[in-house]
Image (cartoon, helix red, strand yellow):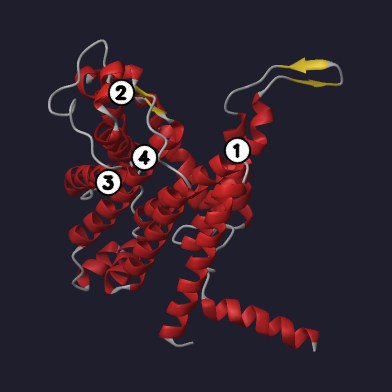
Amino acid sequence: MKRSTRVLLSILFIILIYVFVFFAEKHMDPFIKRILNTGFIYVILAVSLNLINGFTGQFSLGHAGFMAIGAYTSALLYMSPESKMSNFFMEPLISPLDRIQIPFFWAIIVGGLMAALAGFIVGAPSLRVRGDYLAIVTYGFSEIIRSLFNNLQNITNGPLGLKGLPTYTNLWWTVSWAIITVIVVRRIVDSSYGRALKAIRDDEVAAENLGINLFKHKVLAFVVGAFFAGVAGGLLGSLLMTIDPNSFSILFTYQIITIILLGGLGNITGSVVVAIGFAFLMEALRFVEMPMKIFGITIPGILGMRMLIFSILLMITILFFRKGLFGEREFTWEGFVRLFTKRKVNQQ
């Protein structure tokens, strides 16, 4: 299939997605829209973390920290001065943040850039270590960010967090950023940089002997992944209308890792499909954490049961589908056309 044909089909598909968004925003139940918004935010997080963990082979646990930076930065920029004043009643917000208010789009961009800067600052020294050591370093970074945000009372409002955030986030925003994330990561993966990242993942020593600059390529993946994590954090804060440091615990990173492992490491299609499915399943399984009666016996609700179910599902997936549910199967227009061609041949 010609490249121009693939591009045209992709544009038509994106137009169809926006037609769906148009009707969903007008007619869909608000509860379902909220789940979809959460699902597309998961898409941004899963695809961006897959760039680091899946395509580059670096085991990072720092995504929650980058989300927190993006969420707080963007919130402090798009909140009105009056809203900031009502939040910071214990200790005033530092100047000039107490007076600044910029449009939501630019606030999200700045939040992403601040997260990317943090990704560079953390990634530059820590990416010289590998495997479990990198996981420990990035996990430590995430916890340091959470601890700092708990104590910077005149910047983050400490453990009280920020309440009453404007609800700018809707399907237009989440779908658009999810599409941008997929396109950017796909372009990187299909480029010479992407081939270098895969070579680093498969064998760092061999990649270095081939002349690939390990440090430069690792940092590139880390910075891009951190940027989109910051964007997702900004979108999530506006969707939930409240953020606090404990919202960005390591549990959030574990959820995203679960998504990319279920979908398949280094598989963008798997990350997208599983991320949206994960959002719906998280809501569908909410009942398992509530008190219930079975044969007249009252069983108290146990927090965390949903993640226990996902953990069991992950274990089953690893045992029977070692490369995830999607394996190495990526969505392509050639494969899509071939699928329908085979069906027509079988029907004849």
Separation (CA) of disc 2 from disc 4: 20 Å
Q: Name the residue under label 1.
A: 31
Point out residue 271 in the picture as x, y percentages from the top left corner.
49, 55
How crowded pointer 3 is (Cα within 10 Å; few <14, some 14-19, many 20+) is rated as: many
Q: Name the mark nearer the viewer: 2 or 1.
A: 2
Instruction: Find numbered disc 3 in the image and state the secondary structure of the residue it sits on.
Output: helix
- In the displayed structure, does residue 173 sit left or right of residue 283? left
Residues at marks 2 and 1, CA–CA distance in whole angstroms: 26 Å
Left or right of residue 126: residue 37? right
Q: Identify which amino acid the numbered label 2 is placed on.
A: Ser
Question: Marks 1 and 4, how far apart in space?
Answer: 20 Å
Quote the CA–CA distance across marks 2 and 3. 22 Å
For numbered disc 2, what is the local secondary structure?
helix
The reply to whether dot 3 and dot 1 touch (C-beta < 8 Å) is no
User: Few, some or many C-alpha atoms within 10 Å of disc 2 (few <14, some 14-19, many ≥20)?
Assistant: some
Q: Earlier in the sequence, mark 2 or mark 1?
A: 1
Q: Which of marks 1 and 4 is nearer the N terminus?
A: 1
Q: Which amino acid does label 3 sit on?
A: Gly
Residue, far left: 95
Residue 279 image-quadrant placement: top right
Name the kind of residue labelled 4 in the image. Answer: Gly
Quick one: which residue is furthest to the top in this view? 90
Up the image or down, 68 lies above or below 226; here it is above
Q: Where is residue 159 in the image (x, y as percent from the top left)?
A: 33, 18
- The residue to which callout 3 is attached is 112
Dot 4 corresponds to which residue? 233
Q: Which mark is residue 83?
A: 2
